[in-house]
């Protein structure tokens, strides 16, 4: 699954550490999600979208086939 977390995080002026702290996860988790190595739980995806002021559908997308 692809995502636009890095772009939206940077636009909000947040570091990976900042985002992780606000979400109660590790910086490594944020890094893994941003690099498409880990798909977050639905709850975490919803909290990420809320924090980045977007929707889950806009934040995450399936790769083109």
Image: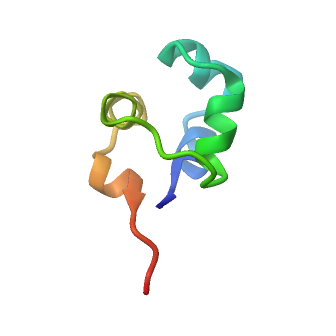
**Which quadrant holds residue 26?**
top right
Q: In the image, what residue occupies the spot 52% across and 12% down?
A: 24
Q: Is residue 60 above or below residue 40?
A: below
Looking at the rendered structure, the number of numbered marks drawn on it comes to 0
The x and y percentages for residue 20 are: 60, 21
Q: Which sits in the foreground, 51 or 32? A: 32
The x and y percentages for residue 47 are: 35, 27
The x and y percentages for residue 17 are: 70, 21
Judge left or right: residue 23 versus residue 47: right
**Which quadrant holds residue 30?**
top right
Q: Which sits in the foreground, 13 or 28? A: 28
Q: In the image, what residue occupies the spot 30% across and 47% down?
A: 56
Judge left or right: residue 31 versus residue 11: right
Q: In the image, what residue occupies the spot 57% across and 45% down?
A: 38
Q: Which sits in the foreground, 6 or 65? A: 65
Q: Is residue 49 above or below residue 64?
A: above
Q: Is residue 40 visible?
A: yes
């Amino acid at each position: 699954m692809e995502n636009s977390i890095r772009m939206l995080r940077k636009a909000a002026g947040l570091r990976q550490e900042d985002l992780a702290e606000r979400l109660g996860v590790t910086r490594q988790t944020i890094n893994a999600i941003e690099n498409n190595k880990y798909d977050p739980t639905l709850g975490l995806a919803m909290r990420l979208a809320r924090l980045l002021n977007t929707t889950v559908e806009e934040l995450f997308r399936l790769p083109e086939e």
